[in-house]
Image: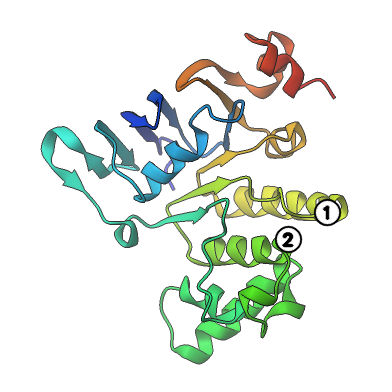
Amino acid sequence: MSPTWRWEVELAATVGTLRLEVGLAGGLQPVALIGPNGAGKTSLLRILAGARAPERGRFEVNGEMIFDTDNGVWLPPEARRVGYVPQGFGLFPHLSAVRNVAFGYRGGDKAQSEAAAREMLRSVDGAEVATRMPAALSGGEQQRVALARALIADPSMLLLDEPLAAMDPIARRRLRAFLSDHITQNRRPTLVVTHDARDVRSLDAFVFVLEAGRIVQSGEWSKVAEAPASEFVAEFFDL
């Protein structure tokens, strides 16, 4: 990818009683979106993934327009080439873990896709659940499968909504390190929603702070931590 590679989003939407009006941009450096519950973080990711439409806005990834309400552009979710891990994991209940992961694989026959899926499950410490159905998996196991499915798709951009929240502390630490290495090695832009400052530090992320539907602060995580613009930010980085 070119070092000038960029993504940009600007949108407005009404979600229940919340008015969401945001503008974000980034490149290959991971971006962390932080904020209190109800600030609009998950709603923003759902719009970017195509699960809901904004009232107005545009979203461009590396020169490709994903949506532009002024010009009638709206790519359906399957055409967006974004790897999305929602809070609810979004697994297909009728498919085994390995088939869920293989669903995201691009190219190759069934045998090749399953082999690649098993390898990706091993990468996220999920090899032992390959043949099990989602209903038989714990929350942490489902989260591993959802993460593996997003990563195997070789997406243009990753959208991760609390991707490690359901895991126990030891698993979270291992997966945090794996995710940081994977993003660095594969040079894929990433927007991650998290409530854990350790995720932000591990990714060495650029931070946007979303409160009540508005961006109230942004910057390198170390600078944001040094000069918090709100009580939430001060508490978030108070480890």
Q: Are marks 2 and 1 in contact (CB under 8 Å)?
A: yes
User: Within 10 angstroms of label 1, few (less than 14), some, or many (20 or more) residues?
Assistant: few
Which residue is depicted at the point 43% across and 36% down? 44
Q: State which quadrant residue 29 falls in.
A: top right
Residue where numbered disc 1 is placed: 168
Three-letter amino acid code at disc 2?
Gly
Image vertical order of residue 71 relative to residue 226, above or below: below
Observer-nearest of 2 and 158: 158
Image vertical order of residue 109 relative to residue 74, above or below: below
User: Within 10 angstroms of label 2, few (less than 14), some, or many (20 or more) residues?
Assistant: some
- Say what secondary structure mark 1 lies in: loop
Three-letter amino acid code at disc 1?
Asp
Which residue is depicted at the point 33% across and 55% down? 80
In the picture, the disc for residue 152 is none
Which residue is depicted at the point 31% across and 38% down? 59
Residue 137 in the image, given as x and y percentages of width and height: 70, 72
Residue where numbered disc 2 is placed: 140
Residue 72 in the image, given as x and y percentages of width and height: 13, 42
Q: Residue furthest bottom?
A: 111
Q: Residue 181 vs residue 80: left or right? A: right
Residue 16 in the image, given as x and y percentages of width and height: 39, 32
Residue at mark 2 to residue at mark 1: CA–CA distance: 7 Å
